[in-house]
Amino acid sequence: MVQGEIEKIEKAKMILDKIAKGINPITGEQIEESSFLNDARIIRCFYFVAEVLDNVQKGVYSSKKNKVGEFIITPEQKNLVEFPSGRIGVNEFSKCINQYIDISKSKKLTGVELNKRLKKLGIFSEESTGDGKTRTIINEKSIEYGFESERKSYNGNEYDMVMINDDGKKYLLENIEKIIEVEE
């Protein structure tokens, strides 16, 4: 890959990461809560595209689906993982983990998979949104494991977003293999 292309990919990733974290990449200010850029579906898209760019840069991108069937992380890879300070969501947690796994040997971790397993373990719960959909929420047990809830707003609709504090990051990282092994 040509140096100019690498720089463009790095800049594009930086911009996508900022938008996904709710930061205006031009001004550095928080994006307004009512902006479509704060919708969870849009945020997931930005994280996905940033991940694709990261894989292109590493030379491991393939348009074919990775046929690797299980999640694998070595103790050495776990020791390399760094998380941003403060509370983060499950998608940000997964992104941090995925930066260090070998995608030729392991499938990637997703926030959806992590939520499913934590619900199965009783650490998270689920509630109906009233429109036939459900959302993941914390419960009494969640707090013991380092999970909190933060009130968010999107297009005038308020919702509680599950957040992982420092204790939760430590718990998840130390136990990620056991959590992922839990049957759906």
Image (cartoon, helix red, strand yellow):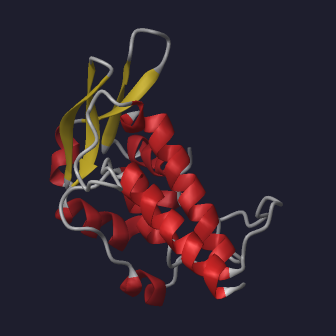
| Residue nearer the viewer, 101 or 175 | 101
The structure residue drawn at horizontal position 43% and vertical position 52%, both measured from the top left corner, is 91
Residue 72 is situated, as x and y percent measured from the top left of the image, at: 58, 74
The image quadrant that residue 55 belongs to is bottom right
Q: Is residue 161 above or below residue 164?
A: above
Q: Is residue 25 left or right of residue 178?
A: left
The image quadrant that residue 64 belongs to is bottom right
Instruction: In the displayed orientation, state which residue is furthest to the bottom.
Output: 76
Q: Is residue 112 left or right of residue 63?
A: left
Q: Is residue 60 above or below residue 31?
A: below
In the rendered image, the quadrant that contains the N terminus is bottom right
The structure residue drawn at horizontal position 47% and vertical position 56%, both measured from the top left corner, is 16
Q: Is residue 27 above or below residue 59?
A: above
Residue 72 in sight in this render: no
Residue 168 is situated, as x and y percent measured from the top left of the image, at: 24, 60
In the rendered image, the quadrant that contains the C terminus is top right
Instruction: In the displayed orientation, state which residue is furthest to the right.
Output: 64
| Residue nearer the viewer, 102 or 45 | 45
The image quadrant that residue 108 belongs to is bottom right
Residue 77 is situated, as x and y percent measured from the top left of the image, at: 47, 84
Residue 155 is situated, as x and y percent measured from the top left of the image, at: 33, 20
The structure residue drawn at horizontal position 43% and vertical position 42%, both measured from the top left corner, is 120
Q: Is residue 174 above or below residue 140?
A: below
The structure residue drawn at horizontal position 26% and vertical position 35%, both measured from the top left corner, is 32
Residue 115 in sight in this render: yes
Report how many numbered discs are placed on residues in the image.
Answer: 0
